[in-house]
Amino acid sequence: NTLIYGSFQLAIILGPLIAGVAVGTSGFGAAYAIDVATFTAAFYAAVRLPRMPPEDTAHVAPLAAIREGFRFLSVRPVILMTFLVDINAMLTSSPRALFPALAAGRFGGGAHTAGLLYAAPGVGAILITIVGGLISRVHRQGVGITVSIAVWAITITAFGLSSSLWLAVLMLAVAGAADTVSAVYRSTVLQVATPNSMQGRLQGVYSVVVTGGTRLGDVRAGAMGSVMSPQTSLVAGGIACLLGLAILVARVPAFLRYDARRVLPPDHNAPVEALSQRD
């Protein structure tokens, strides 16, 4: 998981860099040609993957599958918490929509300054993957997620208060590292504690939460920043993230007690109701 998220962040940094070089040297046509070529290679690699027939051959209607996924989450509070704490962080303290306004207004820069702000979280994420072995030694992953999101909220708040560009970049790098650690632990909990028959459904929910939550967080940040100020939006969002995290953890104390060393192997044949006894 650490390698996956590190590769993702590296792609976020290198992709725009390669595109900028291609546009600057050969124009937009060359940039789009590279895009088509890389997508074609990715599609070809996906087509060449071996078939993986599902273990459960029984057909489930799409709506019934969705209901079953939510019913599974309702009896697995620890897994549900991996979604809730992430939604809380994204909705309250996602900062990316404010980067252009901060670059021009707070730091008196332009596209270069905005580029530094956008790149900083990815740099932090890559640096934390270098010490991925340390991340894997943590077995109390509920505590790890909670601490990581708290660090995220504190550094986003500090970013909102920063008047120095380089201090702001540093805070964003730390926030990006904390977000990656949280994502690694959340994904690990989801994969380890979920039976194979539910993996696809919950991974789908995970993708929706990560994609949709970030966009909703951008809307919240932009709307609040336009009514008040970008700095107020960031500081208020960071504080709200900490408060929301504290409330969620207090409501589900089993989340902090989660220990990967004591997780029972998922019973692929157990009914959903029986799984509630595992947390």
Image: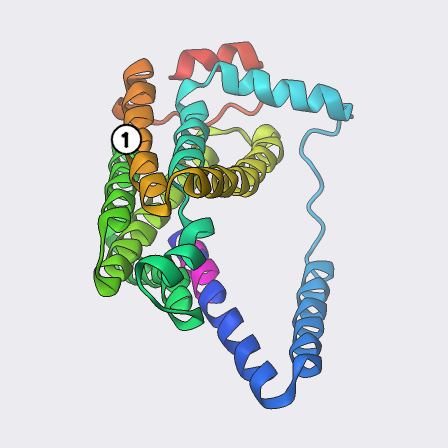
Vertical order, 178 against 267 (above or below): below
Residue 181: x and y in percent read: 32, 47
Vertical order, 108 against 181 (above or below): below
* SS of the residue under disc 1: helix
Left or right of 105 on screen, residue 217: right
Name the residue at the bottom extreme. 25
Is 166 covered by the magenta stretch? Answer: no
Vertical order, 88 against 15 (above or below): above
Main secondary structure found in the magenta portion: helix
Q: Quadrant of the C terminus?
A: top left
Which residues are the magenta region? 5-10
Location of residue 253 by image quarter: top left
Is 7 covered by the magenta stretch? Answer: yes
The residue lying toward the viewer, choosing from 125 and 226, is 226
Location of residue 88 by image quarter: top left
The residue lying toward the viewer, choosing from 27 and 272, is 27
User: Dot 1: within a 10 Å radius of its alpha carbon, few (fewer than 14), some, or many (20 or more) residues?
Assistant: many
Q: How is the image coloured?
A: rainbow
Q: Residue at x 46, y 34 (%)?
A: 190
* Kind of residue indicated by mark 1: Leu
Q: Total label count? A: 1
Q: Residue at x 26, y 23 (%)?
A: 257
Residue labelled with disc 1:
242
Q: Residue at x 37, y 62 (%)?
A: 103
Left or right of 108 on screen, residue 275: right
Vertical order, 168 against 273 (above or below): below
Residue 266: x and y in percent read: 48, 26
Residue 246: x and y in percent read: 27, 23
Residue 211: x and y in percent read: 56, 43
Q: Residue 25, can we see it? A: yes
Q: Residue 122, can we see it? A: no
Left or right of 130 on screen, residue 267: right
